[in-house]
Amino acid sequence: MRIRPREVLLLTVCLAALFGPAASDAVPRAYTNGHDIRLEISKNGLFHVFFDAPVPEELTLTFHRSDESVLGELAPLQIAANSTETITVRLEPLHRGHCTVTANTSLPEDQFSASDVYVRVNVLETFGLDTFSSVVGWVYFAAWTVSFYPQIYTNYRRKSVVGLNFDFLALNLVGFTFYSVFNCGLYFSVAIQDMYFADHPYGLVPVAVNDVVFALHALFACIVTVLQCFIYERGGQTVSLAARGLLVVFALVIIITAIVAGCGVVNWLWFLYVFSYVKLAITIVKYVPQAYHNYQRRSTEGWAIGNVLLDFTGGSLSILQMFIDAYNYNDWSSIFGNPTKFGLGLFSVLFDILFICQHYCLYRDSSPYSAIDGGPPLLTPTELIS
């Protein structure tokens, strides 16, 4: 079949009509080279503004600071028409703290966009303290990660889970299941992240990869401990009715929230937040059954003190890091403005102190069980953590 020049011309015009305007409708924009800057209080900083196309006409770029006490004033910039030259914006820190710098343009949004011009500036006392804070963070991350294994090893050596309270274990299992759902949902789901950025346009996703790894590892360790309860001697212990009732309440909260989110009353990000709130509630109550169990037995045998010591180390260092960062960034609201996070860390440390007192002071020489004739000798508290 022979194609006529007239038909080729007609096809070209049609394609231009379909795709030409879409390409020409692209709005020129300005953007920054990254969105996070850290400055020492004694040193100035800068960031660059780039243009992905020539500026359509002369415009003024105006900068705004979320906290004017942290950074000095940024003068407006005049941008010439057809300019593509990179602009350098200098920052002068005034006080320690956090400040978000955003920009507006004198042109309408349909002619030029500056929505990608923003930087989160963190002004700190010294990078040395920041490095020390990071080291403390990794140490408590390691302590909390390893803290699950003394109990697993104790159960394995004793071939028994007598002394480990099943209510504590059940609450811990459900708590870390919910925590894993929250972290994985917010870290892996692009749709959930879009909902988060809609609420916090200049924010950061509050879940990092180490949060995901820790949550999944903790869940794995809890599952291993639960499996040990089916394999080893458990002394007829079961999950109490009170704990079962509490777990049913938590399940109902999740189910009701899922229905509400499915009906469009709230979004799925809010649904994920409910998982985190339930996890916080579980953290508050989960230690109570184990502490009472030790009191009833007048013994901590079977409850691995290594778990407690590592949890105490992690919790103490976590609180220490909060104070280091609060001083370094002059951001005491991160502690006292967020009593939930600080209170939960302190709550866990206080329970760890109670467990340490039970093990080394109150019930140090107590042993409610005697060795069976011909059977293996009972392990001492020292052997349980060695």
Image (tube, rainbow, N blue to C red):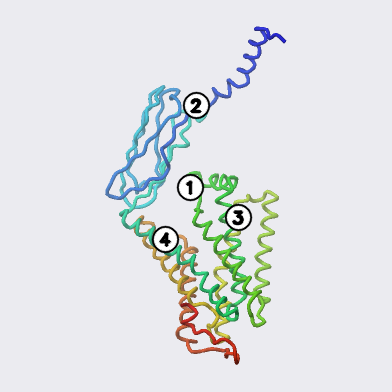
Which of the two labelled residues, at mark 2 and mark 1, occupies the earlier sequence position?
2
- The disc placed on residue 203 is 1
Q: How far apart are marks 1 and 4 (CA)?
A: 22 Å
Which of the two labelled residues, at mark 2 and mark 3, occupies the earlier sequence position?
2
Q: Where is residue 4 in the image (x, y as percent from the top left)?
A: 68, 7
Which of labels 1 and 4 is toward the front? 4
Q: How far apart are marks 1 and 3 (CA)?
A: 18 Å
Q: How far apart are marks 2 and 4 (CA)?
A: 46 Å
Q: Are marks 2 and 1 in contact (CB under 8 Å)?
A: no
- The disc placed on residue 111 is 2
Query: Relative to 247, does residue 76 appear above or below in the rendering?
Result: above
Which of the two labelled residues, at mark 2 and mark 4, occupies the earlier sequence position?
2
Helix, strand or loop at mark 2: loop
Which of the two labelled residues, at mark 3 and mark 4, occupies the earlier sequence position?
4
Helix, strand or loop at mark 1: loop
Helix, strand or loop at mark 4: helix
Query: Relative to 222, does residue 47 appear above or below in the rendering?
Result: above
In the displayed structure, does residue 124 sit left or right of residue 264? left
Residue most toward the left?
A: 42
Mark 2 residue type? Gln
Along the viewing direction, whichever of 74 and 257 lies nearer the viewer: 257
Mark 1 residue type? Gly
Q: How far apart are marks 2 and 1 (CA)?
A: 26 Å
Query: Relative to 116, does residue 259 appear above or below in the rendering?
Result: below
**Residue position marked by numbered label 3 in the rendering:** 272
Q: Distance between the residues labelled 3 and 4?
A: 25 Å
Judge the density around disc 1: few (<14), some (14-19), many (≥20) Cα neighbours within 10 Å: few
Mark 3 residue type? Leu
Judge the density around disc 2: few (<14), some (14-19), many (≥20) Cα neighbours within 10 Å: some
Query: Relative to 104, does residue 141 appear above or below in the rendering?
Result: below
**Residue position marked by numbered label 4 in the rendering:** 137
